[in-house]
Structure formats: structure tokens, C-alpha cells
Amino acid sequence: MATIKDVAAYCGVAVSTVSRVLNGHPDVSQATSDKVMAAVRELHYVPNHIARDLAATRPVKSIGLVVRGAENPFYIPIIAAIGDACEAAGYTMVLRQIPSGADEAGEGAELVQSKRLMGLILLGGRFDYSQEEGKAFGVPVVCCTFVNQFGDLDQESYSSVSIDDANEAYRATHELVANGHRHIAVLLDAPDDRSISELRYRGYRQALEDAGLPVQDDLVVRAPNYTMGAAYEGVRALIARRPDVTAIFSVSDLMAIAAMKAIYDLGFDVPRDISLIAIDGLESTRYSIPVLTTFVQPQRELGEESVRILIDTIENGAESKHVFVGTKLRRGGTLAPCRTADEAA
């Protein structure tokens, strides 16, 4: 764990300056104060008086939940399930919601220290934690909806509950292939984002290769940060450069809704001209016109299983677990057999 000397050396200031900042003395410039506090967060420094309190005080039965991307409606039922499961087990849930671009690892470590938590659930986080970040938590951790597949964090040092992103993307793409589609686009953030898009792109690519279909870069639609606006513009550009496209696999429901609007705005029909399939299962997409065909993630199960694993670790010292839960295909009205003669051949 970092010391006050480490913070001072990191900032290039005296230890006494760091101490004055931490104790709220007014004789430090705002720029220096900001630099010191940024270093405190970056190095996960715990002031001595907090460390003493943590050691001397019996911990309360509290579990932290850090939600990265709190604006994402997909997380709402999961948060509710985690809260219900914590309450049923006699724990208090301490919630912190942060924007998509924020550092959930640093926020989680700080929350553990400031609220004296017994465990931590990270909902919607990065897939590339380092060993140093893992050590900074100091309590059992469960990653909910994702797995640390691109970092060097030892899998025995944390648990996870998620879907198998690559496998579910394979299933979604295979549904399109099975309906006769051959020119199939994928709508994602980036195929090499070291996150969900990269994993789901792997599944898409493998499904095409197994079907003997070429993987073509001009059928990859990039929508940075998974935004609906970027998805909308990306699909318009796709149709302009590839008028032969007959199906789109979207890595999220929200981007699929944006894609549907882009298709309609260009005078085409879903699914007569272009079929759509996605992964998530947002409740709101039951009311789109047509209803979105999507692989539904079991949101309550994701939350409840995360709490169960975490409490088992806290109370019984259980070993880490990495659990994949399955999805269910909800057949809406956005997928139909391919109609074009050249595709059917």
C-alpha cells in the first residue's frame, strides 16, 4: 500500500505539503492540491488515521456496488436485484454510480476504504485490470457482467458473473446465417476495444468462418462508445457503401434501435430489406416497432449470483468463481429469411 512519502515523490513535493493538503490547510495552491489529490487516488493511498480506524473498528456488514456507465438502462434491473439480495442476506448495499469513462477500479478501492466495506461488486467495468489494481481493493471482489480477459489480474484473486460474450455473439450471427443471410454486418464500438465489442466480434467472425463466409472489414460498423447517434450514422454509411447488406448483428439493443431508425429513414424496411438481431434483452425493446429480436440476458440472475458468490467468499472463505449464465433468444419481428436471389443461391 502506498505511503505519504510515495505520494510526495509521485508529485515532486515535500511530505509536509502532502500532509497540509490532506489536512485542509489553506496555504497550498489549488494546482498543487489538485495534483496531490489526484496522486492519492491514483496510488490508492490511505491516510494513517483511516487505516487505524479500519483496524480498530469492527466492520459493518456492508457491500459496495460501483456502477460504471450509470446511464445504461440495462443495469437498472441488475442494481435492483443486487440490492434485494444484499438485504435478504442481512447486508447493506452502498451504491456509487459513475460515468462510462470513469475509473471504477480507483472508485471501488476508495469506496472500500471510506465506507469500511466487506466486499465489492463492480457492475459494468473494464476487461483489463492489472495486478496492482486488484491488490488495492483489499476485499473480495465480484465483476458483474464482465470478466478480466485482457488484463494480468490473476483469476484466483476475484470472481465474475457474466454471459459468454463470444459464444452469444456466435449464436446471434448463426441465426442470421441460418435464415439465408450472407452479407451480414456487425455493429459495435471497435473490433479491438479490449472489451465487450472485441469479444462479441470474435463470435461474429467465427460464425462467418464456420459458415464459409468471408469476413469483410467494410461490413464492420464502428460506433464509438456504443452511442446511439454514432450507431445511426454508422448504419447510414454502411448502407451507402454496401447496398447488398441484408442483415446486421448489433452487440447491444440500444444500438440496434438506432440502426432500425437509420434503415427506415433511408426508405428501407425491417426485416423485409434488412434483418436485425442483438444481445441484451432490454424491456423497452419489447415495445419497439417491430419488436427487436434479441438474446436476453438474465439480469436478475446476474445480480443475485454476484451477491451469492461474494457473501460466500466473505463468510466462508470460498474460492473465486467465474460463472457464465445463459441467454434466451426472444424472437421479435426484426429477423426474417433473406429474400434476395443472390443471397438465396
Image (cartoon, grey):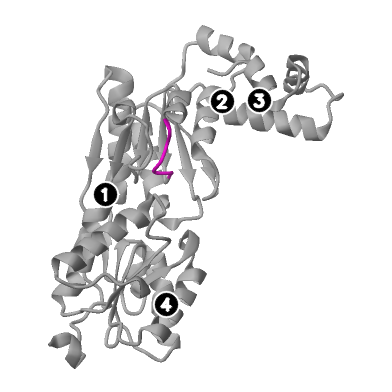
Q: Position of residue 60 (x, y in %)?
A: 46, 19
Residue drawn at (35%, 41%), measured in percent from left and top?
Answer: 144
Please tell me which of labels 2 and 4 falls first in the chain: 2
Mark 3, other Cα within 10 Å: few <14 / some 14–19 / many ≥20: some
Q: Is residue 329 visible?
A: no
Q: CA distance from mark 2 to mark 3?
A: 12 Å
- Considering the whole magenta stretch, tell me its main secondary structure: loop
User: Disc 1 designates what residue?
Assistant: 163
Q: CA distance from mark 2 to mark 4?
A: 42 Å
Residue at the extreme top: 56
Front position among marks 3 and 4? 3
Please tell me which of labels 4 and 1 falls first in the chain: 1
Q: CA distance from mark 4 to mark 1?
A: 26 Å
Depth check, front residue: 284 or 230: 230
Give the SS element for disc 1.
loop
Q: CA distance from mark 3 to mark 1?
A: 40 Å
Type of amino acid under label 4: Val
Mark 4, other Cα within 10 Å: few <14 / some 14–19 / many ≥20: many
Does residue 170 sit above or below 291 in this rendering?
A: above
User: Disc 3 designates what residue?
Assistant: 10
Q: From the viewer's perspective, tell me whether residue 186 is left or right of residue 327.
A: right
User: Disc 4 designates what residue?
Assistant: 235
Residue drawn at (42%, 36%), measured in percent from left and top?
Answer: 129
Q: Position of residue 16 (x, y in %)?
A: 77, 15
Type of amino acid under label 1: Ile
* Quadrant assignment, res 98: top right
State the extent of the magenta-drawn residues as a range: 125-130
